[in-house]
């Protein structure tokens, strides 16, 4: 299954990379305010679905732009064909293909592919996380004042901007630095690779996080909701970090959320 998912991600990534160099032909549609889809998203999704469904026709599929089928199956695939569409539209070379399979409601395998850097992050439950077949481990940073964290605010969740700003204020005052990538899947992959120390965000969609959860866990990191509770894929609220820093960021987020009262 992992080989099929990697092949699907790379096929879609090859097409996305070519399209990135020829964006004059890009057709853009607005799904919501500041939330876009392009003909490239849709083509990438078709490539991925065609590859997966011919091998696993009885599986369930949840894809961002089209497919919602057989979600009661024992194995359900979550597909984000182009995570970071806004970056892609603007010519900012930071986006990814994200594919995950969950088995009986738990993460089973994950692939996040960066077509610009040609980096493929992969994981299987109980078998570790890898980048281009090199084993990954989360960072070992213990001091939050030396930590780099990532976050963001989904464009369709501007109603949460006040909470986001409170959280950012607390974390920015405590940590060394902040990075805004614009691709949740890559943010999670970067946690797994030790490039980032922590990542939190709220209100995301299942396909944004389904692959990253397993990458972080298999690289030795922790994934919960921002209050430290069990991660809920449907809720889309996440805190991912190395074990040394997770509690420190959790305390900051809980304090920020409590300040709203």
Image: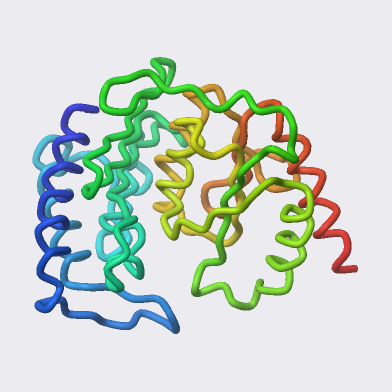
Q: Nearer the viewer, residue 9 or 180?
A: 180
Q: Residue furthest top?
A: 127
Instruction: Provide residue 196's location: percent of width, then percent of height.
Output: 54, 39
What's the residue at 68%, 46% (across, down)? 176
Q: Quadrant of residue 203?
A: bottom right
Can you say whether 238 is above or below 66 in the image? above
Looking at the picture, how far across and down is residue 79, in whole percent? 30, 50
Relative horizontal placement of residue 132, taking residue 206 as reference (left or right): left
Does residue 20 sit above or below 155 in this rendering? above
Q: How is the image coloured?
A: rainbow
Residue that appears at 88% across and 64% down: 259
Which residue is pictured at 12% across the width and 78% down the height? 24
Q: How many marks?
A: 0
Q: Position of residue 229 (x, y in %)?
A: 72, 40
In the depicted structure, whether residue 90 falls above or below residue 10: below
Image quadrant in which the N terminus is located: top left
Q: Residue at x 35, y 34 (%)?
A: 110
Q: Nearer the viewer, residue 102 or 136?
A: 136
- Counting from the top left corner in percent of width and height, residue 224 is at 64, 39
Q: Quarter of the image for the C terminus: give it.
A: bottom right
On the picture, is 157 further left or further right than 182?
right
């Amino acid at each position: 299954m992992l080989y099929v998912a990697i092949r699907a991600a790379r096929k879609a990534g090859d097409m996305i990379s070519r399209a990135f160099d020829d964006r004059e032909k890009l057709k853009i549609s607005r799904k919501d305010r500041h939330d876009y889809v392009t003909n490239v998203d849709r083509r990438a999704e078709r490539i991925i679905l065609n590859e997966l469904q011919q091998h696993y026709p009885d599986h369930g599929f949840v894809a961002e732009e089209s497919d919602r089928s057989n979600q009661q199956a024992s194995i359900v695939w979550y597909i984000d064909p182009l995570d970071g569409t806004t970056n892609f539209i603007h010519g900012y070379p930071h986006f990814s293909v994200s594919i995950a399979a969950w088995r009986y409601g738990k993460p089973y395998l994950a692939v996040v592919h960066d077509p610009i850097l040609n980096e493929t992050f992969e994981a299987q439950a109980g078998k570790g996380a890898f980048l281009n077949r090199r084993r990954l481990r989360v960072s070992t940073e213990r001091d939050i004042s030396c930590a780099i964290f990532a976050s963001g605010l989904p464009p369709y969740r501007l109603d949460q901007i006040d909470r986001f700003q409170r959280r950012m204020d607390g974390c920015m005052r405590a940590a060394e630095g902040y990075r805004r990538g614009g691709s949740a899947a890559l943010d999670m992959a970067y946690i797994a690779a030790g490039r980032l120390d922590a990542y939190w965000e709220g209100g995301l969609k299942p396909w944004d996080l389904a692959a990253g959860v397993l990458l972080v866990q298999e690289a030795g990191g922790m994934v919960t909701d921002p209050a430290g509770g069990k991660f809920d894929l449907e809720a889309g609220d996440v805190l991912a970090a190395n074990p040394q820093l997770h509690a420190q960021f959790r305390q900051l987020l809980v304090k920020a959320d409590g300040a709203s009262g």
